[in-house]
Image (spheres, grey):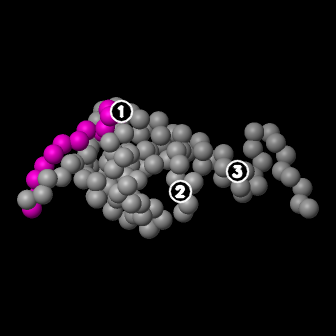
């Protein structure tokens, strides 16, 4: 998948991953890769800035922990993040329905299908 496809959806994707429970940064990367069948194998240089942005926006909470002698930051959805995820999911369903109708050639909103050439 191209980076262009991802634009505008990364925050919602991260929130969706964190809806399953708290994760550290690499856990978020792994969950995105696994849950998308490998389509989104994103580098830490993409994920960590997004995690920091979401934390600053109050959508996720980060806490430090030690695991095996290493300090890790673990992220979890905040109450605002849960609300935002609901908005992101509704927006995504609308987007998929609209683009699906367009790409599949389904007439919608009273429009007539284009004649075959």
Between the residue at mark 3 and the residue at mark 1, the CA separation in whole angstroms equals 34 Å
Q: Residue at 72% of width from left, 57% of height from top?
A: 104
**In which quadrant of the rendered image does the N terminus lie?**
bottom right
Q: Is residue 100 above or below residue 34?
A: above
The residue that disc 1 covers is: 57
Q: Is 36 left, or right, of 101 in this rendering?
A: left
Depth-wise, is mark 2 or mark 3 nearer the camera? 2
The magenta segment is 55-68
The answer to whether marks 2 and 3 mark residues whose Cβ atoms lie closer than 8 Å is no
Residue 35 visible to an observer of this rendering: no
Q: Which mark is residue 101?
A: 3
Q: Is 5 left, or right, of 80 in this rendering?
A: right
Residue 25 visible to an observer of this rendering: yes
Residue 109, picture quadrant: top right
Depth-wise, is mark 3 or mark 1 nearer the camera? 1
Between the residue at mark 2 and the residue at mark 1, the CA separation in whole angstroms equals 23 Å
Between the residue at mark 2 and the residue at mark 3, the CA separation in whole angstroms equals 24 Å
Q: Residue furthest left?
A: 69
The residue that disc 2 covers is: 3
Is disc 3 surrounded by few (<14), some (14 to 19) or many (20+) residues within 10 Å? some
22 falls in the magenta region = no
Q: Residue at 39% of width from left, 60% of height from top?
A: 43
The answer to whether marks 2 and 1 mark residues whose Cβ atoms lie closer than 8 Å is no
């Amino acid at each position: 998948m191209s980076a262009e496809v991802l634009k505008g959806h990364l925050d919602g994707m991260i929130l969706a991953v964190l809806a399953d429970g708290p994760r550290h940064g690499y856990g978020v990367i792994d969950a995105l890769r696994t849950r998308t069948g490998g389509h989104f194998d994103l580098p830490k240089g993409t994920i960590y800035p997004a995690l920091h942005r979401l934390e600053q926006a109050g959508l996720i909470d980060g806490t430090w922990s030690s695991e095996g002698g290493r300090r890790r930051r673990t992220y979890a959805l905040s109450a605002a993040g849960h609300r935002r995820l609901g908005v992101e999911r509704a927006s995504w369903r609308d987007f998929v329905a609209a683009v699906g109708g367009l790409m599949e050639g389904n007439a919608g909103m009273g429009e007539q299908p284009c004649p075959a050439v």
